[in-house]
Amino acid sequence: MSQPATSTAETTAQNTPTPTNAPTQVVPIEPVVINLTLWVPPQFAPSQDTEAGILLQDRLEMFNQLYPNLQISYRIKAESGPASLVESLYSASGVAPLVLPDLVLLPTSDMHIAAEQNLIFPYPEGYPADDDTDWYSVAAVLSSHQSQRYLLPLGADALVMVYNPEQFEMTPRTWADLLNAGKIISFPAAEPQAIFTLAQYLSQGGLLRDTNENIILEPEPLATVFTNYDQSLNANILPPNVTQIVTDEDAWTIFSETEKQAAITWTSRYFAQTDGDLQATTIPTTEGQPFTLVTGWGWALANPDPNKQAAAAELAQFLTEGEFAGQWTQATYLLPLRPFALTYWQNEDHQILASQLLPISTRVPPPDILNLVSTPITDAILDVFTDVHSPEEAAQIAVDNLGN
């Protein structure tokens, strides 16, 4: 009996192997490269020429190794003048936003100006981290504008009195100590911003704002400051040309030419000088209460792109870490704003001075206050020193002229 025939189509279907999918080719995903640009003033630029420059250059290279997709470049901008950090930010924001930097090392005084003009941006939540408590309390004030954090602070500079201990039987703490010692104290009496006189006024408990946030001066504490000046002038413990001392450098020059008795200056100048016989202490006050004013530097976010801001904030945090901040501030003659950073300082005397100054520091008043109060105060100082008005009269005139 014959077998049924099998169709050709059926045979072909049975003998043809089932096709399989071709293997998928895996293409590695390259990380997105983000370019970060820093603007820094010349004295702080990455460089092989200075210790501070080497430290910053090495730190940036370390960050690049940790985050290969973040490529860092920098440009040097002047601290002041038509091509300054703030002026350059203003120019770029208007006509060339693509060349805006991502991170700028700004002085704290410029932070307020830049923030008012929307040239820099507040840090996002978490910078610094909530559990990062290794900061002196003044750091938050130095880095904030209208209660928002605009800087991650890196270093500070404080007012001090430098003196030659051989000229004094004990460390002078008060104006009475200076009068009793009969030694010349040099300070910039004609400085346009009147920073030292404002420090004296604030140490007396003087206020710069009332309960309604209006900018004010109070006559009584200001008169006390002017009385100290007047008594010092009459006791011949001020330089003969005190009304011509405009800058910190002027005061230091006179100090150097008068047997180095006493001078008001900044810690950065004291740390940089090489005379090992000199010492520094808090500025003299009426009752001897410790007090000082500080200014500083910090990293500001300058790019409106949120993604760039997030990357720049990470870099800023990396550049304010304790060990680096300690080494860098020592090399730049600034004060670290982290207690832990001080442990990396090698000069024990400077370390002790910094640890005494930073807990009692108050920030230099912001520009909106200085612009109103400085001129009336400076005019009043000159009136006292030239015997045009008594200390009480000069203080009241300064109060009355506020804002005029």
Image (spheres, rainbow, N blue to C red):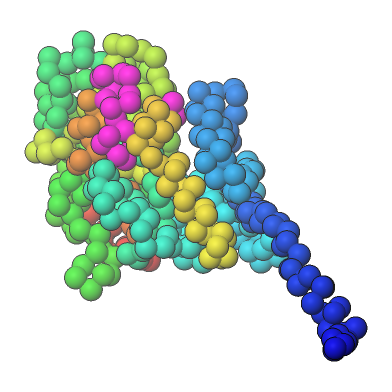
Does the magenta-highlighted stretch encompass residue 54?
no
Tell me if I can see residue 220 in this picture.
Answer: yes
Residue 165 versus residue 289 in the image, above or below: above
Task: Residue 344: name its quadrant.
Answer: top left
Give the farthest residue toward the left. Answer: 287
Q: List x then y, in percent, for residue 45.
A: 57, 35
Residue drawn at 90 percent across, 83 percent down: 8
Q: List x then y, in percent, for residue 121.
A: 48, 63
Residue 63 versus residue 272 in the image, above or below: below
Left or right of residue 402: residue 115: right
Residue drawn at 60 percent across, 29 percent down: 47
Left or right of residue 25: residue 367: left
Pick the quarter of the image with the N terminus.
bottom right
Q: Nearer the viewer, residue 289 or 44?
A: 44
Left or right of residue 116: residue 356: left
Q: Nearer the viewer, residue 16 or 290?
A: 16
Pick the quarter of the image with the C terminus.
bottom left
Residue drawn at 38 percent across, 40 percent down: 321
Q: List x then y, in percent, for residue 136.
A: 25, 44
Does the magenta-highlighted stretch encompass residue 348?
yes
Q: Give the magenta range.
A: 331-351
Tell me if I can see residue 384 in this picture.
Answer: no
Q: List x then y, in percent, for residue 276.
A: 32, 11
